[in-house]
DNA sequence: AAACTATGTAACCGTATAGTTACTCATTAT
DNA sequence: ATAATGAGTAACTATACGGTTACATAGTTT
């Protein structure tokens, strides 16, 4: 059951990561799993607010929840972050090779094409 | 002027990337810079909608705009993605080393501490 | 079983977002 | 000069979001 082989929607992942509080929660969980209440203590917002952030993180599979007595212990799940990492892959070439200049070339090419097009 | 040494807010970057249309625009620009109109043609939504997406991408510094005649040519700027990449860095250890088991340990430790705490 | 505790949900509010159509502005073509 | 074209902005609408307080639920203590 630990390996459900889920596909993580970049949709859910990126929008979960868009909120600073949620990123801070993840950072906190890097240092170890914690129950909801203790997580909430680390933030100036109300506990229900954190509860909602945790739900969003859960739906994005960025955290997993285990019930321990009346505690709900949250644990970081880095899988969706791996997905982000591999999404970034296609852009890596852009900062590793000098592709800016190539881009400039493509642009120039396009603009030439544009002017040619005008002459039908 | 090309090197303004800007700091990219993960805030702006992640929320820009949260929208599938905007990610698609970036993917499109990977293949070369294009004017706004041509970008818009690639999508089923109205041109003003794309215009607004482009503004958001601009504010996130994920694209740059150059005016060429009456065209506005958009070019991908991978810098903020590099920032995302380095934000991810701190999580890489989580999927490279086997930290899951360590986490389990920390949890157990915490729970023990909890029970001890009860006894004042 | 009654009281307490941890956590999630409901209902509500204000603001942001993505989309639309209508309009404006600047540049190119006639 | 006038028309046409590319692109951004304005105004509006519906929905999502983050926050709040009040309430519900489940487990733990006494």
Image (cartoon, coloured by chain):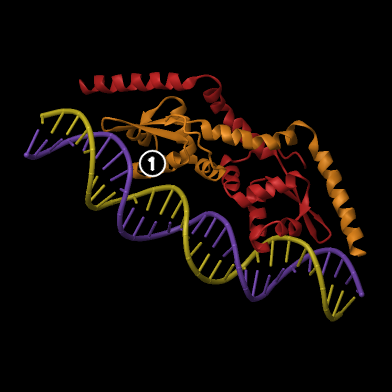
Chain colours: A red, B orange, C yellow, D purple
Query: Residue at image x 57%, y 43%?
Result: A14
Judged from the image, the secondary structure of the residue bearing numbered disc 1 is helix
Q: Dividing the picture into quarters, in which one does residue A43 lie?
A: bottom right
- The image shows residue B61, relative to residue A116, as above or below, that is below
Image coordinates of residue B94 in percent, x first then y, are 74, 36
Q: Is residue C21 left or right of residue B104?
A: left
- The image shows residue A100, relative to residue C8, as above or below, that is above
Mark 1, other Cα within 10 Å: few <14 / some 14–19 / many ≥20? many
Q: Is residue A76 left or right of residue A97?
A: right
Query: Residue at image x 59%, y 41%?
Result: A9
- Residues B48 and A96: in front is A96
* Quadrant of the snapshot with the N terminus of chain B: top left
Whether residue A6 is visible here, answered yes or no, is no
Image coordinates of residue B83 in percent, x first then y, are 57, 35
- Residues C7 and A24: in front is A24
- The image shows residue B5, relative to residue A97, as above or below, that is below
Task: Count the labels in the image.
Answer: 1
Q: Which residue is mark 1?
A: B50
Query: Residue at image x 29%, y 19%?
Result: A112
**Host chain of mark 1:** B
Q: Dividing the picture into quarters, in which one does residue B34 lie?
A: top left
Q: Dividing the picture into quarters, in which one does residue A2 lie?
A: top right
Image coordinates of residue A32 in percent, x first then y, are 78, 46
- Residues A30 and A62: in front is A30
Whether residue B77 is visible here, answered yes or no, is yes
* Quadrant of the snapshot with the C terminus of chain B: bottom right
């Amino acid at each position: 059951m630990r390996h459900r082989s889920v596909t993580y929607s970049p949709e859910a992942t990126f929008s979960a990561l868009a909120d600073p509080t949620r990123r801070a929660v993840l950072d906190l969980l890097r240092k170890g799993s914690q129950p909801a209440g203790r997580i909430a203590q680390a933030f100036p917002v109300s506990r229900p607010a954190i509860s909602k952030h945790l739900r969003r993180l859960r739906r994005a599979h960025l955290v997993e929840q285990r019930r321990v007595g009346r505690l709900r212990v949250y644990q970081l799940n880095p899988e969706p972050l791996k997905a982000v990492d591999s999404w970034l892959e296609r852009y890596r070439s852009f900062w590793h090779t000098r592709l800016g200049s190539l881009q400039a070339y493509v642009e120039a090419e396009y603009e030439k094409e544009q002017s040619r097009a005008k002459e039908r």
